[in-house]
Amino acid sequence: MSQDPAPSATVRDDLLAAALALIVEHGDLAFSLRQLAEAADTSTMSIYTQFGNREGLYRALAGEAFELFAAGLAEVDVADNTDAPSALRAMAAAYRRFATEYPSAFDLIFGGVVSFDAVEPLVDEFEGRPAPSATGYEVYGMFASVFSNGVTAGSIRSDVPLRLVMDSYWAQMHGLVALERLGYVRSAADAGERFAFGIDTIIAGLAPPGPHS
């Protein structure tokens, strides 16, 4: 007697897990749908049934990449995040580590590999979960408590809206990582020095202005 087919949600989860494992293992998105089907112990038809096409697969996979990204950031110990500069340096290091250890996952999220539907503007409580944008908001929000506690402790400026402070920091951090990913560095040591200096510079710039500023 034949076994009942696996539930659709299980097939989808298995395909996404296998696809994420493939890009982590090989460092690129150049896997065939046949390779993915074999890795997930299913058929290529299941891929089309679940995702429609490769673009749909990539969109869903980007959500998985965001989850991996969020998990890496969540491992950073920022319990004492009243020391905002130290916490921000640790989170920036985790951000860069994800980009260098999982380049294909990083490119899925930020590299323009796929296009995502527009979502509602960022608010305090984002209802719904359109992958991966809602997860992206959650990642962005991981920095929020660090910044707000830094404002309270006096290490982060409070004379401008917090969102502007966070955006400036994020832009500096992401820009440095993106330049490294594009190869605009002389060596790994050069990349590390640039990143450390850039993060220190933006953190210093986000400190409260002095009496003569």
Image: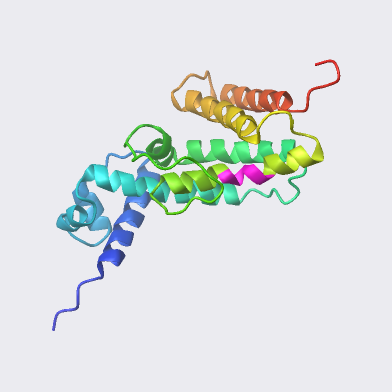
- What's the magenta region? 141-145
Residue 168: say if magenta: no
In the picture as drawn, the residue positioned furthest to the bottom comes out as 1
Q: Nearer the viewer, residue 25 or 174?
A: 174
Where residue 62 sits, quadrant-wise, is: top left
The answer to whether residue 190 is above or below residue 163 is above
Magenta: main secondary structure equals: helix
> Residue shown at 30%/66% (left/top)?
10
The answer to whether residue 64 is above or below residue 171 is below
Q: Quadrant of the N terminus?
A: bottom left
In the picture as drawn, the residue positioned furthest to the right comes out as 211
- The reply, left or right, for residue 95 in relation to residue 3 is right
Q: Nearer the viewer, residue 84 or 178?
A: 84
Q: Does the rendering let one see residue 11? A: yes
Residue 25 image position (x, y, % from top left):
38, 46
> Residue shown at 69%/23% (left/top)?
201
Q: Quadrant of the C terminus?
A: top right
Q: Does the rendering let one see residue 25? A: no
> Residue shown at 62%/40% (left/top)?
91
Q: Nearer the viewer, residue 94 or 109?
A: 109
Q: Nearer the viewer, residue 123 or 10?
A: 123
> Residue shown at 40%/51% (left/top)?
64
Where residue 194 sits, quadrant-wise, is: top right
Residue 138 image position (x, y, % from top left):
52, 48
